[in-house]
Image: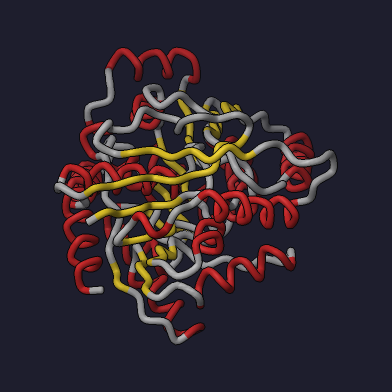
C-alpha cells in the first residue's frame, strides 16, 4: 500500500514522535510510506533523522503577520498543508491531528486524546476532525469510549509502541553527566502548559521540598503550536511565591533525552488529558519510577506499574514515597509493560486495519 501519514509539526511532541515511529515500522513491514508535515520557523526536516525507507515531505510554512493570533494561524496551517498535499498519490491517507485532518478531508484519523477548546477556530477544527474522517483509531480504550459516548463514533483501538531499548539502554556516561549537572531531580517532559498540569506539579514540588530540600524539579520539552504565554507567566509568578526555582531545560536533543529520563529519581506525569502517556511509558522502559495523575486512561494503560495521585498534596506524597524507597517489583513490572508495547505490533495492527477498509 501507498500510505501517507500527516502531522502538523516537525517538533518533538508526542503525536509527532508517534507518527515517525509508526511510519518507520510500517516501512519495515514492507509498506510504501510518506510522512507529510508543515515546516515552521524555516524547518526543512524533523527533530531527528528519519529512516531513509520513509519519504518525508515538509511543506514550508512561512511566518505570519505580526500579531497573528492562534485561530488565524490554525486556519492558515490547514490551508497551506491542504494546498500542497496530493491525496490521489496514496491508497491510505492517515491524519494524526486535527490540523492535518482538516487539511486533507476524508481520511483515517488517529484521535490521541479529546480536547476542549474555547478559541472558535480551534473548537471548529477539533469538531470537524472528529466527524469528517471515514475511519478512526484511538491509542487507548478509554479515549475510544469517550469518542463513542460523545460522538457515536466507533474507533479501532491500537496502542502506541514504545522505543524500549532506546530508554532501557541509555548510556551510563550520559546519565552521569545529567546527575552531575542536576543532582537529585523529579523530571517532567512536555513543557509548561495547562494540559500538562504544570501548576499542580509546581505546587506538589513546593510541598515535596519541605521534606526533600535537595530535590529539584526539572522540566524538559515545550515545543507547541499554541500560545501559553499567560499560563507560563502565572506559573513563573507562582514559583516565586512558593520560593522554588524549577530548572526549565526546554527542548532536549534527541540523544540526550534517554539518559535524562533514566537518570531522574522520579518521573512526574500530572497531565489532565492524555490518550496513552508515551513519555511516562518511556520512563518505565528506563527503569525510572513514575507518578501519574489518576485518570481512567492512565489506569488502563499503566495498571500496577505506576503510582497514581490526584491533586498537589497526593502528588507530593507519591513523589516522596517513590524517592524514599526502591520498589523492585513495580520497576520490573514497568520494564515488562514498556517492552510489551512494540512499534512492530502497532504497525501490523495498522496494516490489518487499513486492509479492512
Is the residue 123 above or below the residue 33 in the image? below
Residue nearer the viewer, 136 or 113: 136
Q: Residue at 55% of width from left, 55% of height from top?
A: 82
Indicate how the structure is coloured in the image.
secondary structure
The quarter in which the C terminus is drawn is bottom left
User: Is any part of residue 188 visible from this angle?
Assistant: no
Locate residue 172, reporting x and y percent.
27, 17
**Could you tell me residue 159's position as x and y percent?**
28, 60
Q: Quadrant of residue 177?
A: top left
Find residue 38 and report its horizontal and vertical position in percent: 54, 43
Give the image location of residue 204, x and y in percent: 59, 46
Q: Is residue 315 visible?
A: yes
In-front residue for pair 23/181: 23
Question: Which one is in front, 101 or 115?
Answer: 101
Residue farthest to the front, as pictured: 88
**Residue 288 found in image quarter:** top left
**Is 206 rendered above or below residue 77?**
above
Amino acid at each position: 500500500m501507498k500510505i501517507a501519514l500527516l502531522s502538523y509539526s516537525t517538533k518533538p511532541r508526542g503525536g509527532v514522535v508517534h507518527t515517525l515511529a509508526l511510519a518507520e515500522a510500517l516501512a519495515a513491514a514492507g509498506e510504501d510510506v510518506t510522512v507529510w508535515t508543515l515546516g515552521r520557523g524555516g524547518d526543512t526536516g524533523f527533530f531527528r533523522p528519519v529512516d531513509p525507507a520513509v519519504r518525508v515531505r515538509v511543506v514550508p510554512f512561512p511566518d505570519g503577520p505580526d500579531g497573528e493570533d492562534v485561530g488565524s494561524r490554525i486556519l492558515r496551517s490547514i490551508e497551506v498543508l491542504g494546498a500542497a498535499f496530493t491525496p490521489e498519490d496514496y491508497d491510505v491517507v492517515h491524519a494524526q491531528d486535527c490540523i492535518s485532518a482538516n487539511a486533507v478531508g476524508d481520511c483515517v484519523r488517529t484521535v490521541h486524546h479529546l480536547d476542549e477548546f474555547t478559541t472558535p477556530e480551534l473548537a471548529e477544527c477539533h469538531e470537524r476532525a472528529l466527524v469528517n474522517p471515514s475511519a478512526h483509531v484511538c491509542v487507548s480504550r478509554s479515549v475510544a469510549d469517550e469518542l463513542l459516548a460523545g460522538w457515536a463514533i466507533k474507533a479501532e483501538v491500537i496502542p502506541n509502541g514504545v522505543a524500549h531499548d532506546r530508554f532501557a539502554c541509555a548510556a551510563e556516561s550520559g546519565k552521569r553527566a545529567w546527575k552531575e549537572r542536576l543532582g537529585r531531580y523529579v523530571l517532567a517532559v512536555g513543557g509548561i502548559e495547562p494540559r500538562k498540569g504544570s501548576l499542580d506539579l509546581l505546587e506538589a514540588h513546593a510541598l515535596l521540598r519541605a521534606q526533600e530540600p535537595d530535590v529539584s524539579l526539572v522540566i524538559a520539552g515545550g515545543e507547541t503550536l499554541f500560545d501559553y504565554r499567560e499560563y507560563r507567566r502565572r506559573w513563573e509568578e507562582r514559583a516565586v511565591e512558593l520560593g522554588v526555582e524549577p530548572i526549565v531545560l526546554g527542548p532536549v536533543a534527541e540523544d540526550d533525552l534517554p539518559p535524562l529520563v533514566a537518570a531522574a529519581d522520579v518521573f512526574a506525569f500530572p497531565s489532565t488529558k492524555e490518550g496513552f502517556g508515551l513519555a511516562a511509558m518511556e520512563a518505565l522502559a528506563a527503569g525510572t519510577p513514575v507518578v501519574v495523575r489518576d485518570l481512567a486512561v492512565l489506569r488502563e494503560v499503566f495498571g500496577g506499574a505506576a503510582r497514581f495521585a490526584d491533586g498537589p498534596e497526593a502528588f507530593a506524597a507519591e513523589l516522596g514515597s517513590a524517592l524514599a524507597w526502591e520498589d523492585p517489583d513495580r520497576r520490573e513490572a514497568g520494564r515488562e509493560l514498556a517492552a510489551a508495547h512494540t512499534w512492530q505490533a502497532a504497525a501490523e495492527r495498522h496494516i490489518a486495519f487499513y486492509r479492512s477498509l
